[in-house]
Image: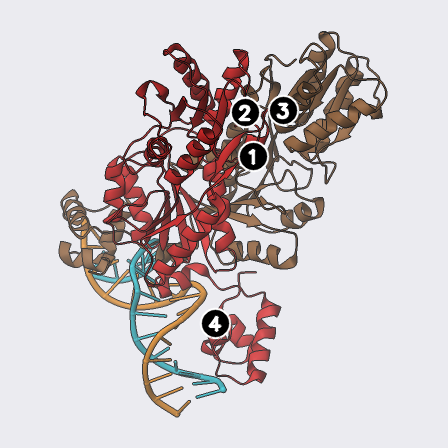
Chain colours: A brown, B red, C cyan, D orange
Amino acid sequence: MARATLKDVAARAGVSYQTVSNVVNGQNGMSSATREVVLQAMAALDYQPNHAARAMRMARANTIAYVVYAPTAASFADPYVGRILDGLHRTLRGERYDLMTHVLASTDPEELDALRALFRGGRVDGAVLVAGQVPDDLVTALAAWPHPLVTFDLVREGGAPGVTAAHRDGVMGAVAHLAARGRRRIAFVAGPSPSPHSVAARREQGYRDGLAAVGLQYDPTLVVEGDWSHASGRAALGTLLTRGERPDAVIAASDAMAVGVIGEARSRFMRVPEDLAVVGFDDFDFATWVDPALTTVRLPVQAMAEHAAQALLARIAGEPTPAGDVLPVSLVVRGSA
Amino acid sequence: MARATLKDVAARAGVSYQTVSNVVNGQNGMSSATREVVLQAMAALDYQPNHAARAMRMARANTIAYVVYAPTAASFADPYVGRILDGLHRTLRGERYDLMTHVLASTDPEELDALRALFRGGRVDGAVLVAGQVPDDLVTALAAWPHPLVTFDLVREGGAPGVTAAHRDGVMGAVAHLAARGRRRIAFVAGPSPSPHSVAARREQGYRDGLAAVGLQYDPTLVVEGDWSHASGRAALGTLLTRGERPDAVIAASDAMAVGVIGEARSRFMRVPEDLAVVGFDDFDFATWVDPALTTVRLPVQAMAEHAAQALLARIAGEPTPAGDVLPVSLVVRGSA
DNA sequence: CTGTTAGCGCCTTCAT
DNA sequence: ATGAAGGCGCTAACAG
């Protein structure tokens, strides 16, 4: 049997089919008797409104896109990316919105066109862009589009509205924590920074400002750049140890790198935290898997994602949206520092 | 400026709008001169076909759903779930299909209705269901639906077609590997099994069959059930050590639990693998983060997801689909066993 | 090879 | 409180 339409329901209920439409859309203005009859007919026919027809008529898809910029292969396997998705779903559940995931594989024109087609074809009403690693020019280009867009972890003046966290403050707090425990040679394993507005850049700024705040000298030989990966964290400690005076603490810009630092320290028979205190950033599950458990800066990813979804929905609805929403982070002190 | 429609393009190109439609859809049968004119008009107007109109007319959404059954909060943060999503995207890229993620929070009627509405409203053409933890009755109910559905990691006779891997063989191989290295008291940390067709059940079956294959006795005191989590792996080793004779090897049904076992062993000053050999299952990134690196059974998640997407697309296209697609797994030998 | 016509299922006037 | 018409943008029949 073909799917029932409004007409079928109307015929069965013995009313005109816009009356059925009214019932479906909760318009008041019909007798409760007719409403009841219509409701029964709908149930009997197992009626389900056709999404495409509705979307066309209303010029609204009731769908948003979660866009991940991923020049490398794996992307959704990253807990950062996955948790954001969880948070978005959490907000969208209840709202009448669905979520589409979209991978932006590069900044090539075809890729941008594919994304733009999503908007222009009316397939989505708006998008959340995970912008942690996105090149600046891409963000600039996207912000110029006349479509509702909210960026995640990349707030810039004049850019699209977005939500982020106090990355800089988080690392400053970590530096203060270490300094208060008597550490003086605090090293930093940075993330790759495609732009001064990137998460990596802001975390590194927190390192510099944190040192200044506690009266410690910035020493470039104590800074190594990683690529967020565990392996790069291991390598970073190796590099640091070949450079003159040893650090007595390391702050890594991600938990994965911090775990790498701890692993490398152990294999060199350094004690953590006695010989080397280690602090991470993120507070992902595996932060508690290492021994000693990782002291880290907790990024409230889920809450950020919920804010992002709400901001996007507000923009779609035409409501004014705050330009930048900055959530606080917190230092979670465990055994490693 | 409002978005250009077929009519606008036709007016500008001086042809009927049906001709434009033909050009857009790559129908041949017009002079290359007119085609050229139309193409130029399209470019000038930045024309983009309206998805909803097309979907309505074609009765096809060109969208599939990735449905995750997640009674607990976090879901997409799980690397298993995330990697599948990566794999689906990989296949869908190139095909003209988009992907929608959907969380099935429970087996309540409202939740099932929400999913059914996706199909019946014509919002998606098919779905991939991650079924590793899904209760049997849910799977049965879904398989009865007249919609294209492919299950992931749950193949049953009479059920929906699906893709899975040789979970049983994988654990059998692990047992054989340990036995060949002289281990005799091989323990097993199982996953929670909601059904005899679940991944957890099949991995445990591999343990039993593996023991039998090498002539070892099955001993229930060597089996503990965890919940896939790191913490449950730690706890499982604790439990095993209180039960009479100690095991000399442990196979955990997931990498997370295996890492937990290693962590617990270390904190009890047991040497791995000398005192206790440990094997995991999955081969996720963090398997190489521990010391010694984890010997584990690699689950080809990405390839499985690509198969699943292809199978679903085939079903949607009405092509016959193999009922069950079983991919091989492989033992990755590292330091822990 | 091109143009005309007729809906797909729905919602929004407008009239009753 | 209910009914009739019109059209959203597109494609699949035709007809010319």
Residue A165: give x, y in percent of width and height: 61, 28
Q: Residue at left 27%, top 42%?
A: B139
Q: Which residue is mark 2?
A: A286
Mark 4 → mark 2, Cα distance in angstroms: 50 Å
The label nearer to you, 1 versus 4, is 1
Callout 3 amino acid = Val
Residue type at mark 2: give it: Phe
Chain on which label 3 sits: A
Judge whether D13 appears above or below B313 on screen. below
Q: Chain of mark 2?
A: A
Mark 1 neighbour class, 10 Å CA radius: few under 14, some 14 to 19, many 20 or more: few
Q: Mark 4 = which residue?
A: B25
Give the Cα separation between the discs numbered 3 and 1: 12 Å
The secondary element bearing badge 3 is classed as helix
Instruction: Give neighbour class at mark 4: few <14, some 14-19, many 20+ (Cα, 10 Å).
Output: few
Residue contact between numbered discs 3 and 2, judged by CB atoms under 8 Å? yes
Residue bearing mark 1: B285
Tell us which disc is closer to us: 4 or 2: 2
Give the residue type at disc 1.
Asp
Using the image as rendered, state which of residue A232 and residue A42 is in the foreground. A232
C-alpha separation, residue under disc 1 versus residue under disc 4:
43 Å
> Which mark is nearer the camera, 2 or 1?
1
Q: Residue at x 31, y 33 (%)?
A: B106
Element under label 2? helix
Left or right of residue A151, residue B107 in this image: left
Of mark 1 and mark 4, the one earlier in the sequence is 4
